[in-house]
Image (cartoon, rainbow, N blue to C red):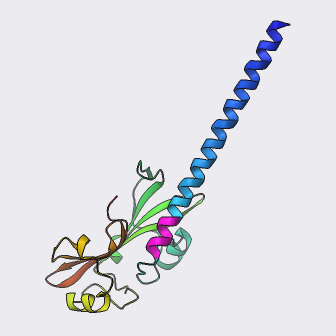
Amino acid sequence: MFMKKSSACVIIILILILGICSFILIREQSSINQYAQCMLNGTQAQGTIGFLDLGTSDKVLIKNIGQPELKSEEVIWISDGLEHQTWKYEDKGIEVGMIRNKEEQQVWSIKITSPCNYKTREDIEIGSTRREVLNKYKDRINEEHSFGNQDIVVLGSIYNGTIFHFERDKVDSIFIGAGAE
């Protein structure tokens, strides 16, 4: 009799522990997805390059520019708990950071270089002059995160924004996303 009661208690305790662990894991996954969506939504307001926005699905990306030439392995970042992967379209001058959100992947960061001819909403592209960038974005430049560096201009912040890199006073690359953690 005593043995049956102790076995029943152990089983009940194990069921409670499993239930609590499941609840914690579900809640954690929900928090990760909310964090990712918050980052994507916050950065999306910073900019668009061509058809690319942060949060663009892998299906839209593939439909517009095809399969990437190179894909890195998917790696879970400790800083955010998300699966990250880099897709490179070297012949097109496009590199996108992807995150997995359930079954699909979404664009997490965008970097373009030559020969990419995509433009920002303000018509800035690879080869635009520093003066054009400064004129178009004068009210949005973050002097603090530009570090007095003549080679970069930051809109938003390096943690969530757009970064223009210059070579000989011309835009050499445009990055949108989290450039630092």
Is any atom of residue 169 visible in this view? yes
Residue segment shown in magenta: 38-44
Main secondary structure along the magenta-highlighted residues:
helix
- Report whether 4 appears left or right of 18: right
At horizontal 13% and vertical 83% (from top left) the residue drawn is: 168
At horizontal 56% and vertical 71% (from top left) the residue drawn is: 59
Is any atom of residue 94 visible in this view? no
- Classify residue 133 by image quadrant: bottom left
- In reply to whether residue 12 is colored magenta, the answer given is no
Q: Observer-nearest residue: 108 or 61? A: 108
- Classify residue 84 by image quadrant: bottom left
At horizontal 43% and vertical 50% (from top left) the residue drawn is: 75
- In reply to whether residue 42 is colored magenta, the answer given is yes
58, above or below 34, in the image: below
Farthest-out residue, right: 1
121, above or below 177, in the image: below
Q: Observer-nearest residue: 27 or 84? A: 27
- Classify residue 175 by image quadrant: bottom left
Farthest-out residue, left: 168
At horizontal 24% and vertical 87% (from top left) the residue drawn is: 127
Residue 131: % across, % down = 21, 91
In the rendered image, the quadrant that contains the N terminus is top right
In the rendered image, the quadrant that contains the C terminus is bottom left
Residue 157: % across, % down = 33, 70
Residue 111: % across, % down = 34, 72
- Report whether 111 appears left or right of 51: left
151, above or below 11, in the image: below
- Report whether 152 appears left or right of 84: left
